[in-house]
Amino acid sequence: MELFSKKLSNKKKVRGGKRQAARVEAWRQAHRMPDLNHLEAYGCDYAKLTLDPWYRLDRRTPPARLRRQMLAAMLDVRAAWAEAFAHQPPEYLAVWVGWPNFMESQVVLATGEQAKYYRALHPVLEESKPLPNALGLTPALHANLSALNWRESLDEYPLLAEDLPDDGGAWLSSRPHRITPLRAGGAVYWLERGRVWIGE
């Protein structure tokens, strides 16, 4: 996926509204239970918005009506996962809402070292803004979102030195980024591409 490619336009009318809504509902039902085998093997599970045609190589931002349905579905999935672990709350369970990269939004569950990794993944900002109005939230959805504690962070994409173009230094200098060293040598270049709000 092109990291800084132009967003695909949604000015044309989105056809098949009922079909789109049915896909969101099918996604919701398919993710009502976390994958316990994946959780046991890897210490994490997640439910990404892998909904066609929005989640393709070039991500597209769905219209506000569909975004609201997806947000509501993610909140329902998170609530179902919390209920599944009511006897022993997980170390990490959160909804990530990305903007403007909305289709990177997901529900994330983690334990042990993976929980520590996800908590440290997103830098803490000095000032955290509320969820953006551009999401098109209704009062009812805003109330449901307010049940979680939200913080704003950077939406970043990691690259290694071999992933950078030949003029890596000049290319990086024109883009917001940060660098973290690797124990084995080298570094990870975190390219800023937007914001993500984490709700727990």
Image: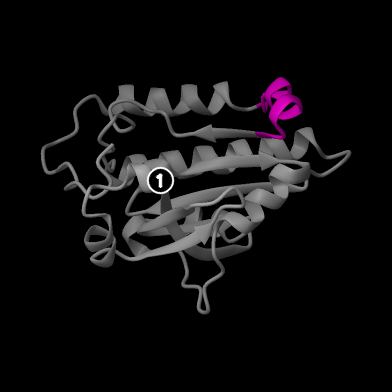
Which corner quadrant of the image does residue 163 belong to? top left
Quarter in which the N terminus is drawn = top left
Residue 16 in the image: state x and y as whole percent.
24, 24
When the figure is inspected, residue 162 is found, relative to residue 152, above or below; the finding is above
When the figure is inspected, residue 180 is found, relative to residue 7, above or below; the finding is below
When the figure is inspected, residue 164 is found, relative to residue 190, above or below; the finding is above
Which residue is the extreme one toward the left? 12
Quarter in which the C terminus is drawn = bottom right
Q: Residue at x 40, y 47 (%)?
A: 159
Neighbor class of circle 1 (other Cα within 10 Å; few <14, some 14-19, many 20+) is some
Which of these two is toward me, 69 or 151?
151
Identify the secondary structure beneath mark 1. Answer: helix
When the figure is inspected, residue 194 is found, relative to residue 118, above or below; the finding is below
Q: Residue at x 77, y 33 (%)?
A: 84
Give the magenta part as a residue range: 33-44
Give the residue number, with chain letter if any, for mark 1: 68
In the picture, measured across the screen, residue 161 lies left or right of residue 129, that is left
